[in-house]
Image: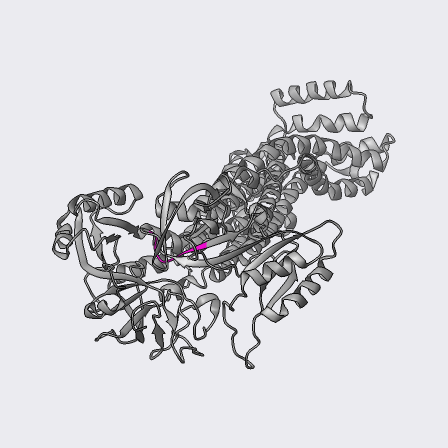
Amino acid sequence: MTALGRVVRAGVRRRRTQSVAIGLAALVATTCSVLGGSLLVASQQPFDQAFGGQHGAHLTARFDGARATAAQLADTAHAPGVTAAAGPFRTVTVDPEPGPGATGAGGATGMTGVDGATGADGERMEPMTVAGRVDAASGVDNIELLKGSWSKKPGEVVLDASYGSPVREVGGTLRLPGLPGAPTLTVVGFGRSVSRTADAWVTPDGLAALTAPGSTPGYEMLYRFTQAATAEALAADRAAVAAAAPAGALTGAQSWLTAKQGSDRNTAMFLPFMVAFGLLGMAMSVLVAGNVVAGAVGTATRRIGVLKALGCTPAQVVRAYVAQALIPATVGTLLGVVAGNLLTLPVLATTGRIYGTSTSGIAPWVDVAVAGGTLAAVALVAWAAAARAGRLRTVDALAVGRTAGGTRRDRAAARAAELAARLPLPRPLSLGLAQPFARPARAAGMLAAVLFGTAAAVFAVGMGGTMTWVQAAKDHDTADVVVHPQRPAGPPGATPPARPAAADPAAVTAALDAQPGTAAYFGDGTEDVTVPGVAGSTRVTAFDGDATGAGYRMVSGRWFRGPGEAVAPATFLTEASVALGDQVTFTSHGRAVTVRIVGEVFDPHMQTNELFTDAAGYPPGAAPHPDSWSVALKPGTDRAAYATALGAALAPVRMTAEAGGSHGSSGSIAALNSLTATLTALLVVVAGLGVFNTVVLEIRERKRDTGVAKALGMTPAQTVGGALAPVVLVGALGGAIGLPAGLLLHRLTVPAMGHSAGLRFPASALDVFGTPVLALLGLGGVLIAVLGALLPAVRAARARTVEALRAE
């Protein structure tokens, strides 16, 4: 080992606390940056790979078959901006049921069923959009066949893997009881359309048997455009297609950006959160590294003179002190890369399976870029702090023995000490209050450490409060008692049906009215419908009764007040391109229902398009029957006893009653809370270590002065008070600045998280700080500073006076 290497190793060992602080700060910065960068890159890779491989459709347009012919629609392939087109394909929407023997124990890779159930004969399924295509490859939206074969004759069907079907195996059947003759379709294959252009595909001549009497099948055209990267570009493309088609023929269009946003939505919410913590961690790592190196240079002036006298060049001295910062930073950076990648894997575990890609979520270039950037930042700030060591003259360094203050700084410190002496405080405290003015740069570093630590704590509390609000929005049902169908046990190992048949609503309401303690109740039923321009199906929840107590959180507008009104989440409003006050028409089992959107509801179920409306707005007999009821009890009623009695009364109609309650925290919210707590704890520890380092340097430099004060009668308690006084002053100022900084960071990050996930947060999701909480957080800076300075202050108080007087 070279002489310079021994100097570096000795410096790292001698400053273990400072080295740990640098390593922890680099670990936090690298972990957050790797996780954020990997999520940003890898969350888009599965969709982008699948979309490129299938030559996906930028726009899926649906046309009214009664207003346009196939030839007219084929001509739209020549509209301005169109680079490729496929179609027209005939389309119909049917209501299937699992056929006899459709229940399967296995499934194709990547396929999901309705709530994970295998299904049962007669079970109602989601409406299914069927397109007539000759083969899987059409030039645009080439279907990836996962299992089985393509349909070759009428009566055969290929199902999209994302369609919620209980039929999981080739050879299963689907019944269509709503069509003449109740035709049966045999499943011959399972495919995947990344553009979600249809739920199933049959041969063109097989579509006639799926068309209801008196109705005309629609048409579907698939387009790719020169410019389709933004919503504005796609809006112009859609207008060009609509202008090329017969007037009024275009009934809806689905953008590829909507499908992409849906695929990215699970991980997108993490990105602003990770960026915020990554910036905090990077700032802390740079700050701590600069403070440590500057402090080492300031307290080792004589050692620097000795090194130069022994032959070290100025460049070697600078490299020695930069290396003392880079060694712990490198260890922390490598650990941070590993931690960031380990956190990335579970977040993206399901994305690759959905699109059939093999990406792990780990991008090596992100690891290299983050690690290199972190170490470069640490090296740069360490070099700036160590440059002073290289400029010191050997004779001056050996003669002074420690850093001498400048004349202007000494005058400022003297004025500060004079003003502090006039305060009605004990002399040790007034002397301590003047110390930050003697070392303004060092005090500024400690102030920055406290500021960032306080901001991180405020940000963490705010994120925790917002996530608690989100969880409460998910657990919106505040009913005292919930009534729902009994789930049959079935044979051992079998999965029960996802939607057990509900009882006659009249029987349930009669039991509720007869039960003592019932204050109010409402029922709700759900069904899956189709909405023009919205990919897949939309789930409608129809409420029977006064549902104002359903507990849904509103973002804007109001809850519906009667028939013909509805509320919807931001995901649906965006995909359907509607706003408050607009009308939406959906098709429920062949019958059109029109509602007016009067409010935006907060819906954290990010993969679902939903509408909430009054069942009275349906045509007579068309509304879905309620399959659950929410009950509010009169004050003083025992919930458990009420639920038991009501359950006994409903047993003959195969319904049960349970006391209401929270459903627990979701996986994504739990992950965010865990990450917040861990990263915040690390940042606060780093801030405390930054304070610790500064106080240690101050005490070492003033060791002789402290010995003199002790010889004159200063007690250990006064010694501790004098050491903590400047820290409390800096901590109070850092807390006062860090509090609004953390609040601002929270108010910027949460809306960005919602925007990334296609959600909008109302003001109530941000206003999660109460006055007592803000007061405590304001004192957080003082707490961080005192905890960081307490140990060196106590050690200084316990030091022997004689040893302190011998210090140079």
Q: Is residue 326 above or below residue 429?
A: below
- Where residue 801 sits, quadrant-wise, is top right
Relative depth, front residue between 233 and 677: 233
Task: Tell me which segment is drawn in magenta.
Answer: 534-540
Residue 357 visible in the picture: no
Q: Tell me: 474 left or right of 86.
A: right
Please report the residue visible at 74 percent of the width from the left and 29 percent of the height from the top.
432
Relative depth, front residue between 736 and 102: 102
**Image location (x, y in percent) of residue 213:** 25, 63
Q: Is residue 379 above or below residue 62?
A: above
Q: Tell me: 117 left or right of 712.
A: left
Please report the residue visible at 71 percent of the width from the left and 54 percent of the height from the top.
517
Q: What colouring does the structure picture have?
A: one colour
**Image location (x, y in percent) of residue 625:** 49, 60
Residue 173 visible in the picture: yes
**Image location (x, y in percent) of residue 218:** 23, 57
- Where residue 795 sits, quadrant-wise, is top right
Q: Tell me: 9 left or right of 157.
A: right
Q: Tell me: 331 left or right of 224.
A: right
The quarter of the picture where the C terminus appears is: top right
Relative depth, front residue between 516 and 787: 516
Q: Is residue 16 above or below residue 86?
A: above
Q: Residue at the far right: name it.
A: 713
**Image location (x, y in percent) of residue 393:** 54, 33
Relative depth, front residue between 214 and 750: 214
Residue 291 in magenta stretch:
no
